[in-house]
Image (cartoon, helix red, strand yellow):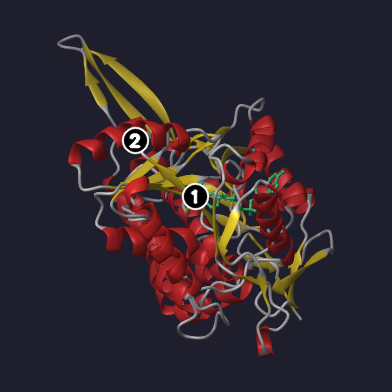
Amino acid sequence: MSKLKNFINGTFYEPLTKEYIKSYNPATGDPYMEVPSSGPDDIEMAVRAASRAFPTWSNFSIEKRARILIRIADLIEQNLEKLAIAESEDTGKPLDLAKTVDIPRAAQNFRFFGTAIRHFSSESHSMEGEGINFTLRKPIGIAGCISPWNLPLYLFSWKIAPALAAGNCVIGKPSEVTPRTAYLLSEIVKEAGMPNGVLNIVHGLGQKAGKALIEHPEVKIISFTGGSQTGIEIARIAGPMLKKMSLELGGKNPNIIFADCDFDKALNTSIKAAFRNQGQICLCGSRIFVQDKIYEKFKTEFVAKTYMMKIGDPMDKGTAMGSLVSESHLNKVLHYVNLAKEEGGNILTGGKQVHLKGRCAKGWFMEPTVIDGLPYNCRTNQEEIFGPVVTLIPFSTEQEVLEMANSVEYGLSASIWTQNLSRAHQMAEALNVGIVWVNTWMLRDLRTPFGGSKNSGLGREGGWEALRFFTEPKNVCISY
Ligand code: NAD
């Protein structure tokens, strides 16, 4: 079984704890890798390296930093196949998805921020004859970047690329469930000529390595993506230490389909929004509200399409649904299906574990599941399931659907399907979320603010928002 190592100061190290976590291939159910279970001493070693590297890296010219980031993007693209296989084996997602979405997007993140930093500028405020203010934006120091398992390299790079572009040093802690592409990134970073200590990648459990990273007094910026409860725990520690925080948390997103929509487009995109990556995307549209005039037609066609989805070996071409990420996560999702039944829901299709034959016989697969007949305010319709389970809920008026859509504790994203322009505008304004898509889903422009309201997070990532987050503004006022 292969053993991963931490990447600190440009060198690969065994964890000082000498402890490892077993990592599984969720599609086969077999253990296949050992991951360092790092502790506070490993974090300390990474902080020392980052702290030594900071004066040099933060004083590199923007052009020099940008070139290294773009070189990383190029190398990710050159290693697309290898990275995509690693991502698929770690997560159970279809290899095709990793090849066409996850890995290209990780390269794009580095290229985007390598370019953005060249164009980043700060404000000036003239005081009409009295003087002028201008704002300097300086890198802050050491950023702690913690990422989840659902889009491993995609989300890891979405944090570390802007942090590095802005001139900070980084200690990254990828999810212990899916650490392999972050490990491969360490090799790429070395090849790209990144100075030692600028990016350090420490593997381990959230409660141990992650917590030590959050608690370290020299780590002044925390960028976290993961569950809302974890985000709250992190804020409890980082808040009183006055650390700068960006928290990207859970979602329970409404997908609202009006009778005047482009029916085929709404139907086909809703299938993707429901089940892409086995429904394990924070932006998935898991509560599907359908206007009563088209409810029965939509339900029949949505269920038929769901039933036809091919569940299979993630390595096979044509597999639409791979495995869930772990046995415990599969059990959590199945538990929610039982809860839905107890709450009076009708399982229209799916609801069960799938046992494949051959290589994947012990894998953690599940049928895509559609449920209706549940009130909007029951637990199934309020809590994040984060799996291939969606509910259908009929509505008649805009007011009614708005109340139901906004009723959850989350506020990440929403989709609206309508041909009525004023309705689209009014709904977009009234939905209490950070991102609204009209007649689409997950169409991403990396320049736009990304993040959620309510328990879906704090702050925004993307574009200038990310570069502002990773820099400290200093106002300089000059009297004439
Ligand atoms: P998680 O919160 O369990 O773990 C996320 C990361 O935090 C992991 O690296 C984990 O090791 C670490 N961690 C856990 N406890 C910690 C602690 N006490 N201190 C420091 N670090 C800790 O989340 P997950 O199960 O990996 O991911 C799924 C969740 O992530 C879902 O809720 C999903 O909605 C959310 N998510 C949000 C976004 C977004 O952009 N808003 C994107 C993807 C996933």
Residue 104 horizontal/vertical position (percent): 40, 69
Q: Is mark 1 within 8 Å of ligand 1?
A: no
The amino acid sitting under disc 1 is: Thr
Residue that carries the numbered disc 1 in the rendered image: 56
Q: Would you say residue 167 is visible in this rendering? A: no
View extreme (right): residue:
18
Residue 397 disc label: 2
> Viewed as shown, does residue 11 lie left or right of 248?
right
> Viewed as shown, does residue 166 lie left or right of 372?
left
Q: What kind of element bears circle 2?
A: loop
Name the residue located 40 percent from the left edge and 37 percent from the top edge.
Answer: 401
Quadrant for the N terminus in the image: bottom right
> Viewed as shown, does residue 64 lie left or right of 479?
right
Other residues around mark 1 within 10 Å, as few (<14) / some (14–19) / many (≥20): few
View extreme (bottom): residue:
358
Q: Would you say residue 287 is visible in this rendering? A: yes
Q: What kind of element bears circle 1?
A: helix
Residue closest to the eye, 160 or 24: 24
The amino acid sitting under disc 2 is: Thr
Q: Is residue 68 above or below residue 62?
A: below
Name the residue located 19 percent from the left edge and 41 percent from the top edge.
Answer: 421
